[in-house]
Amino acid sequence: MGRERMDRPEIDAALMQWLLERVQSGASPEDVVAAMVGRGWKEGDAVAALESAMREHLEAHARDNDLPPPERVPAPLALNGPSVIEAGDRRVTVLANLLHPRVVVFGSVLSDAECDALVAMGRERLRPSSVMNMDTGSDEVQSGRTSDGMFFRRGENALCDRVERRLAALVDWPLENGEGLQLLRYGPGAEYKPHYDYFDPARVGASGTLARGGQRVASIVMYLNTPAHGGATTFPDARFEVAAVKGNAAFFTYDRPHPMTGSLHGGAPVIEGEKWVATKWLRVGRYD
Ligand SMILES: O=C(O)CCC(=O)C(=O)O
Ligand SMILES: [Fe+2]
């Protein structure tokens, strides 16, 4: 770094290169920060410098590899953070926290009564679930998705509004960037084969929905019942699955529409009983 103590550190090219070399040679962020602190940096400044170097590196990597640039995503939680989050009107617990893919499993997002009420309000409106055809933009029933579903409009009723406000507080993302809740029912054997929730920007059919709020950057799958057997939400790239437990939720983010996010996921077949979920998708911008 060639620099001794300083009050207002600046990141010059030499420092940037040193930081990237350290990280690329396998040093952990903690090691790099410790080395900087050993050279007279304040810890907070060292963390900020490292973050900035990493961001620049990721952007350059995206440019060089013809990848879409990363978007801002909801980021509610550092590793080894609080176990309980005050989410507006409810205390939600943190059950698991995975960095890649970025998945947080929340406990007790909804009360049992709220789960039951969402099911009761939506069940008469269920239709076979569809998948968007990204070439045409139209919704089609497909064999990879054998649930029934319906959409509530955002703020359609007091319960939707309450849940939406809670989720916005939980993951710290504007209420206005959320799509309306989607209710899904999987009967025995029904599943949703692994897929990505983002829209493929290269396909013309995605342009209509992308014009409305931009890309999806996060999903919150809330379990409204506990299936007797099966029905987990799977993340095949991580060989990880989230068990469907009433009131809990799987939250995952994807900072760009690319498989490198590891956000491939699916609803595994229900072996016994039914599975009900409510899914909330979050857009990068305001969704009207
Ligand atoms: O049912 C699940 O576990 C996953 C649902 C899902 O992936 C979706 O609604 O996009
Ligand atoms: Fe999905």
Image (cartoon, rainbow, N blue to C red):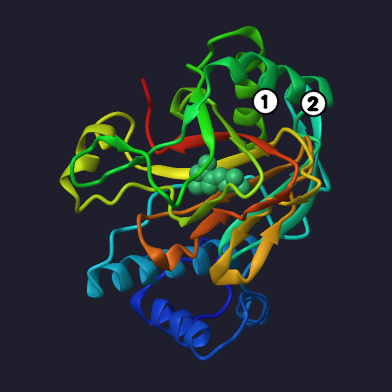
* Above or below 86: residue 38: below
- Give 174 or 115, whichever is nearer the viewer: 115
Residue 16 in the image: x percent, y percent?
Answer: 41, 76
Marks 1 and 2: CB-CB under 8 Å? yes
User: In this view of the protein, can residue 74 be seen by the observer?
Assistant: no
Which numbered disc flags the more N-terminal residue, 1 or 2?
2
- Give 229 or 92, whichever is nearer the viewer: 229
Q: Is residue 273 left or right of residue 75?
A: right
Residue 246 in the image: x percent, y percent?
Answer: 79, 37
* Above or below 10: residue 229: above
The amino acid beneath tag 2 is: Arg
Residue 212 appears in which quarter of the rendering?
Answer: top left
* Above or below 269: residue 156: above
Residue situated furthest left in the rendering: 204
Q: In the rendered image, which residue does mark 2 sit on?
A: 90
Q: In the rendered image, which residue does mark 1 sit on?
A: 166
At 28% from the left and 51% from the top, the residue drawn is 200
At 35% from the left and 42% from the top, the residue drawn is 215
At 68% from the left and 53% from the top, the residue drawn is 232
> Looking at mark 2, is its residue's CB closer than 8 Å to ligand 1?
no
Q: In this view, does 139 lie to the left or right of 156?
A: left
- Give 123 or 287, whichever is nearer the viewer: 123
* Above or below 231: residue 260: below
Mark 1 to mark 2: distance in Å?
7 Å
SS state under label 2: strand
> Looking at mark 1, is its residue's CB closer than 8 Å to ligand 1?
no
SS state under label 1: helix
Q: Quadrant of ligand 1?
A: top right
At 64% from the left and 83% from the top, the residue drawn is 35
